[in-house]
Amino acid sequence: MTTEKTTHVVVLRYFAWLREKTGVSEERLTLAPGIATVAELLRWQASRGHPFDAAFAKPEAIRVALDHAHVKPSASIANAAEIAFFPPVTGG
Amino acid sequence: MTTEKTTHVVVLRYFAWLREKTGVSEERLTLAPGIATVAELLRWQASRGHPFDAAFAKPEAIRVALDHAHVKPSASIANAAEIAFFPPVTGG
Amino acid sequence: MSVRVETADFDISAEMARLTAGNTGIGAVASFVGKVRDHVEGAPLTSMTLEHYAGMTEAELERIEAEAQRRFNLSASLIVHRVGDLKPGDNIVLVIACASHRQAAFAGAEYLMDYLKTRAPFWKKEVLANGDARWVEAHESDDAAAMAWQTSEK
Amino acid sequence: MSVRVETADFDISAEMARLTAGNTGIGAVASFVGKVRDHVEGAPLTSMTLEHYAGMTEAELERIEAEAQRRFNLSASLIVHRVGDLKPGDNIVLVIACASHRQAAFAGAEYLMDYLKTRAPFWKKEVLANGDARWVEAHESDDAAAMAWQTSEK
């Protein structure tokens, strides 16, 4: 772990109707330095333009996991390697 | 069904430790006319002498069924054909 | 809906398949298997004998099953209880409750067990490793569990 | 303790035998099977597809299982969840909870299901007889059921 400022490369994953609406199941990208929390990342997704704007128009309907663990919108994404977006789960 | 006074012949059955203590699993007998309720029948059992006196010494530890249905000590035995005595059940 | 008392063991997969066959409205199947434990209050157990009151047992189990069906709107249910000589690890009892949704299925299975434990005329006699044989005593906690259904605690 | 995610069906008898093998301290085995129903809100269902988040699913199920084990002192437990294409009547999920006594086994199985329903990353897509395909929406009642464990209502 280093404290100096580095670019933050993450894998973003999409499931269920978020996968269908975005047309993407997985992408690797470098996050802009201003995006620190899950809530900020959701706002950035909604600002990416088609088809992400429509898919992320209602962020309250979207759940987020950082490295395979559920998190709240206030969570920091600083240490995340894999970030997943999906609707509330419906298994069982 | 007749309303005239008839002798009441019943089958009495004994289970678990009541069967072991009395040495009887089933007997057929004519009830004395004075025995109208389950509680009275339990008192009569305790008065029959060995080995029934010991088996029925604690009537509160004994459950009774009339014709395959659980009943309380206050129940009338007037219409019973089969009366069973057993400890609280322990299946499952 | 059916109840069975038998000496033979049961196969839960086969029973479940039979119970749900042809009814694809069933979304939830809750079940319970009771087994002979190897210890009772710290003492090693060698075997257990289950006695029952043939005739009343079936009548009582059918009453319990009918009430569970009514209360929880079960689509299907089953109670199988073994009698005779059993060893540690052997199955004693199987209950299955089928419903559209899981809350009713779970509640149905728990209800069947709670009432079976306090109403169905079975008695267990345990033989311990030291040779002692004793009739199992009823648990107050079982009465309390059955009573709770009447006072809406459950 | 184990969790599995697979396309194949499961056999509850075999799973139960494996889970209890060699542990005669187990007196109670509660289980639940969830199945595909033939109707959703009155509309006939043709098939269902289950998607999941491989990696997170197993991690989340293991967290749920570990918490159930701790809370209810379970002797053994199992979660099997199917993924892929399923038809009405097909099995979706199996949970088994083993304990010394029935209250813990039942509570363990219910806990596993309540948390699986609200935490494990599975998503159902239903295809109706009229050709419509739609993602199942989460139920508030499922959130409430899981929440109840936190506030000691259960």
Image (cartoon, coloured by chain):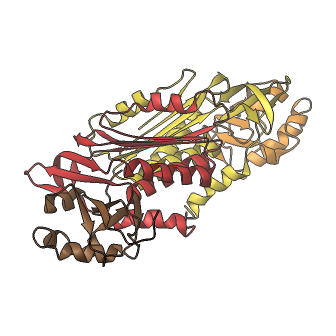
Chain colours: A brown, B orange, C yellow, D red
Using the image, determine if residue C147 lies above or below residue C60: below
Q: Is residue A16 left or right of residue C134?
A: left
Which x, y percent locates residue C116?
58, 42
User: Is residue D64 in view?
Assistant: yes
* Farthest front residue in view: A4
Q: Which of D138 and D35 lies nearest the eye of the viewer?
A: D138
Q: Is residue B41 left or right of residue C143?
A: right
Using the image, determine if residue D66 lies above or below residue C95: below
User: Is residue B34 in view?
Assistant: no
Which x, y percent locates residue B25?
74, 25
Which x, y percent locates residue A52?
15, 69
Q: Based on the displayed image, in which of its 4 quarters is residue C84 positioned?
A: top right
Residue at (53, 37) in percent of width and height? C59
Q: Based on the displayed image, in which of its 4 quarters is residue A17 positioned?
A: bottom left
Q: Based on the displayed image, in which of its 4 quarters is residue D67 positioned?
A: bottom right
Q: Is residue A42 left or right of residue D77?
A: left
Residue at (37, 35) in percent of width and height? C19
Residue at (31, 75) in percent of width and height? A33
